[in-house]
Image (cartoon, rainbow, N blue to C red):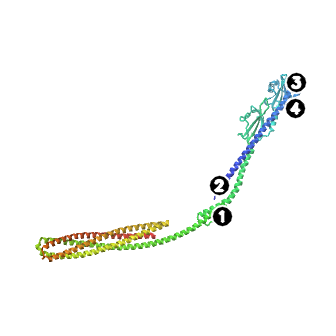
Amino acid sequence: MKNHFIYRIILIVASLILVSFGILGYFIYRISSGTVSAQVDTQLAMTGEAATDGIQKWLAGRALLVESLAENVQRLGNGSVEQLIDRPLLQQTFSSAYMGFADGRFARYPETPVPDGYDPRTRSWYQDGAAGKGVAMTRPYVSYANGKLTMSMASAVMRDGVLQGVAGVDLDLDTVKTFLSSFHVPGRGYVFLVDADGTILVHPDSSKVMTRLDGSVRPDAAAETLAGSSGRMLTVFHPIKGLSSVKWLVGITLDRDAALAPVYALRTVLAVSLVAALLVILLPLAGVLQKLVAVPITGMTRAMTTISQGKLDIAIPALDRGDEIGAMARSLEVFQNNAIEMRRMEGERAAAREEAERNRRALLDGLAHSFESSVTRVAERMSDEAVRMQSAAESMSGMAHDAATEAAAVAAAAEQASANVATVAVATEELSASIHEISRQVQQSSGMSTEAVSEARRTDDLVKGLAEAAGRIGEVVALIHGIAAQTNLLALNATIEAARAGEAGKGFAVVAGEVKTLATQTAKATDEISQQVATVQTATQQAVEAIHGIGGSITRINEIAGAIAAAVEEQHAATAEISRNIAEAAKGTQEVTSHLGTLTSTTGRVGDTSGSVLDASQTMSGEVDHLREEAASFVKEIRA
């Protein structure tokens, strides 16, 4: 496992150390570099001043000797020239001393041969000395006598304002070279001598003498400093003051890298120190962090991973520590204990859910059994009542058909009576014969009336029985409607319990919804049956009233028949009464015909009503079967 957290801490600490030590090292380096550069610049300035001052004094001392020689020659005259130039001081100081006369003569010490025709007046030293005031110095040149770099110093000898000649000396510049090499210049530097034109006069490297400086180095350029220089080599020039006839400069050249070597060494030391500091600090820090932080955190991470996988019996490390890691460990222990408690509570909840499921199943089984028993009983009662209602409807239909047949027969008899009355009216003379016939017809009508009364009473009894059956059907329908309402209430309670049960009660909620739907359909069916039963009851009541009317009509017919019989018996009393009796008989027959029509219409309606009752009973039987199927399906779903 990679300790990314520890790596980040080490990286942050390393970054802080790098930044801190880097800034500190940078300032140390800058200060040291500035100090060293200032020291080198100061040393260069001091060296340049010392060199220029030394050369100036060296040349000035020798110029005094030359002036002294010229004055002595002027004062002593020409006869003492050899003695003057042969003085030990001049011999020790100069490589040679000489005198060039205005007439062309030349005297020299030490004596050395000169070329034939040598004329000192043509030489530059003579001309410069004769033309100038004071001591004239020539540009260095290679002496033909010894092959060394030499320069001449000359001074005019005047007497009474007339040039007598020029006294001169040759100065070996090796002495200047030795003098300049005595200066220590840092950074493998050296001191050299140049003139204003850039010609090197004295240089440690003899091959560069009398050569011109590199184009990048100019004697008249502004003086540079070590800190401000950009190249590797730094050259500074210091002019020699007090020289009237020439302009010489002391040049000092040094290697910039060599001069700044201590600074570069300090930079290396700082870099090595920074790396060493990183190692010295980070390695122990890494060990300490690994022991005090990484190992406990790794252990806690492993413990958290194990706990997240459901293994709660793992030991948590670093519980006895008093720092933040110990607090984290104790927090993890609290989490572990909570997880153990949650697992225990989950087990208890699972057991409670199982117990609730068993109780719910038992309750549902009880409800299903109770519902099945209730629905079965109601369905059986409804089926029995439907069968009885169907039988009663069939009987009522038969009786209505018989009543219609009898009414037709009575109507025929009434028509026959009407014809007989017409016959009596036409032939009064046949009254006697007709009386016998009328008596017979009256007896027959009386018998038929008696039978009609009897049939009307029987029909009345049947219709009353039909009304009672319709009433019982209404009671059964009301009972079914009450059961449907109770079923609907049970379905509502089941829906509420299913909602309380949550996810586990979704299936039961669907079943409760189906039961509620069946209860609603049953209630609708019972309402329709109630309407049909109400219609049957209304029709039955109308039939009862009609039958009562028929009975009254038949009674009146019977009374008419009795009146006819009385009229026949009293036919001898008054023949005039015959017409009245015939009129009454006609009127009675008309009433009979009218009542018979009403009876026929009523029996027709009774037949239609009985058909409707029959259809309703058959529909109710089908609904009962459907109720049984739905109840069985509901109970099956509940028990599933």
Figure quadrant of residue 451: bottom left
Residue linked to disc 2: 8
Density class for disc 2 (Cα within 10 Å; few <14, some 14-19, many ≥20) is few
Q: Residue at x 87, y 32 (%)?
A: 89
Give 163 or 608, whichever is nearer the viewer: 608
- Mark closest to the chain's N terminus, 3 or 4: 3
Residue 12 location (% of width, % of height): 66, 53
Figure quadrant of residue 533: bottom left
Q: Is residue 386 among the parts visible in the rendering?
A: no
Q: Residue at x 35, y 67 (%)?
A: 528
The residues bearing labels 1 and 3 have C-alpha atoms spaced at a distance of 119 Å
Residue linked to disc 3: 77
Three-letter amino acid code at the position of disc 3: Gly
The residues bearing labels 3 and 2 have C-alpha atoms spaced at a distance of 99 Å
Three-letter amino acid code at the position of disc 2: Arg
In this rendering, which labeled residue sits more in front, label 1 or label 4? 1
Three-letter amino acid code at the position of disc 4: Leu
Numbered disc 1: secondary structure: loop
- Mark closest to the chain's N terminus, 4 or 2: 2
Density class for disc 3 (Cα within 10 Å; few <14, some 14-19, many ≥20) is few
